[in-house]
Amino acid sequence: MTETNNYARDGAIPVSSEAPTGAARHAPLGFYAFVALIAAAMGLNAVAIDIMLPAFPQLSAALGIHDHNEIQLVVSSYLAGFGLSQFFIGTLADRFGRKPVLIGGLIVYLIAAVVCGFAVGFEFLLVARFVMGLGSGAPRVVVVAVTRDCYSGRQMARVMSLVMTVFMAVPIFAPLIGQAILSVLPWQGIFGFLFLFSLTVMIASIFFLPETLDPADRREISVARLREALASVFGSRTTVGYTLAAATFLGALFGYINSAQQVMTEAMGLGEWFPVTFAGLALTIAVSSFVNSQLVERMGQRRLSHGATISFLLLSVLMLSLEETGQLTTWIFMPLFACSTLMIGLVFANFNALAMEPQYHVAGMASSMTGAFTVLIGSGIGFLIGHAYDGSVAPLLTGYVLASGSTVLILLVTERWKLFGAIEAEAG
């Protein structure tokens, strides 16, 4: 295959004359203002999860939860709503435009945050968290669709990498913010913060974010159009393959998030150092996301993401082997684990960009379907990994090996057993 074909394959050359026109589509927002705003919108999802982690012990005591693994449902219930809502958010965004759907989702999110603060029982809290997750599906779907409206190929991967860089600042600071809030307020104060954060993003979106969907491209909601969009999404080997790859890989990350507080404070004996440790690991993802944004236009999505996935698998196998032989001390685990999290920033932005590349004309529906399946499958895997926690790090590392190994297998099937951009792109 020629170098030109490789270059076109990763999207550096527009695939059609109707490709997006870049920054002109999101004027008057400049490039970095656009990235900052959509990253903040997507960051609502991360902060809703990560700010809760330091509150797990207080929540367990306040709501009478005796099974410490059960408190992980605070994360899982949110993710269930987050995943399910994405099935229909894209259809609405394709019909009514990106901006009104985003604002509607933010309104649901901030109302649910208030309701969570008044929860009087664990089941009540889980229902409210599920509704909050439903609202958070809008920012996730709309952010990807808006980015696809404006950019394509390696440029889209660069934008998504920068978004991920800002986005990953949330896990760096969220547990620390949560810990700070808990030092002066009860756990309800965390939901007060989520309300204020979502309100700020909503106001900024109302006044500064333009509508990026051309009125001529709006799609009526009909069975025929839904069938056409579904055929486009599920008829693309690239879209299906990279959606499944993102889902299984995300399962490893969700498994970590679900059990992070227990693994770090108990199994690794870090105690009150957990928020700082969690922030440090999140920083590695932010750094690698930024590195990806600088390298992706030159090296391509496939080379970076495939190499990072294989490296993640090898590191996971090494850590599990050391754990099984009793050699995995905290001082050995933390550097190796940090190296594995460093790979994450090289994976998701590229997987998402590759999955969305063939879907310009149905970007909203495609963003919905890929997002929903990624989150629902990933959260299911993460739930199983988290609930397998037994006081040691072995269940987490076993989950890492199985999830990343499955991802590599999916990539091989998707790319017809040739990784790193070694074959021609699928037609259409």
Image: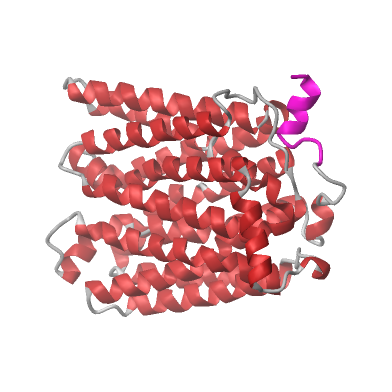
Please state the horizontal and vertical placement of residue 181, each as a whole percent of the image: 35, 63
Q: Residue furthest left?
A: 66
Q: Is residue 126 above or below residue 162?
A: below
| Quadrant of the image occupied by residue 25 | bottom right
Q: How many marks?
A: 0
Residue 328 visible in the picture: no
Q: Is residue 284 above or below residue 240?
A: above
| Quadrant of the image occupied by residue 54 | bottom left
Left or right of 277 in this view: 65? left
Pick whichever, 382 or 282, lies toward us. Answer: 382
Residue in view at x 61 percent, y 34 percent:
292
Left or right of 112 in this view: 211? right
Please state the horizontal and vertical placement of residue 252, each as a whole percent of the image: 37, 41
Residue in view at x 81 percent, y 60 percent:
27
Residue in view at x 28 percent, y 77 percent:
124
Is 4 magenta? The answer is yes
Q: Is residue 355 above or below residue 319?
A: below
| Quadrant of the image occupied by residue 322 | top left
Pick whichever, 110 or 428, lies toward us. Answer: 428
Please state the horizontal and vertical placement of residue 407, each as a whole percent of the image: 45, 35
Q: Is residue 221 above or below residue 423?
A: below
Please state the horizontal and vertical placement of residue 290, each as a whole percent of the image: 60, 37
Residue 313 visible in the picture: yes
Is 289 magenta? The answer is no
Pick whichever, 169 or 313, lies toward us. Answer: 313
In which quadrant of the rendered image does the C terminus lie? top right
> What residue span does the magenta drawing correspond to?
1-14
Residue in view at x 41 percent, y 39 percent:
280
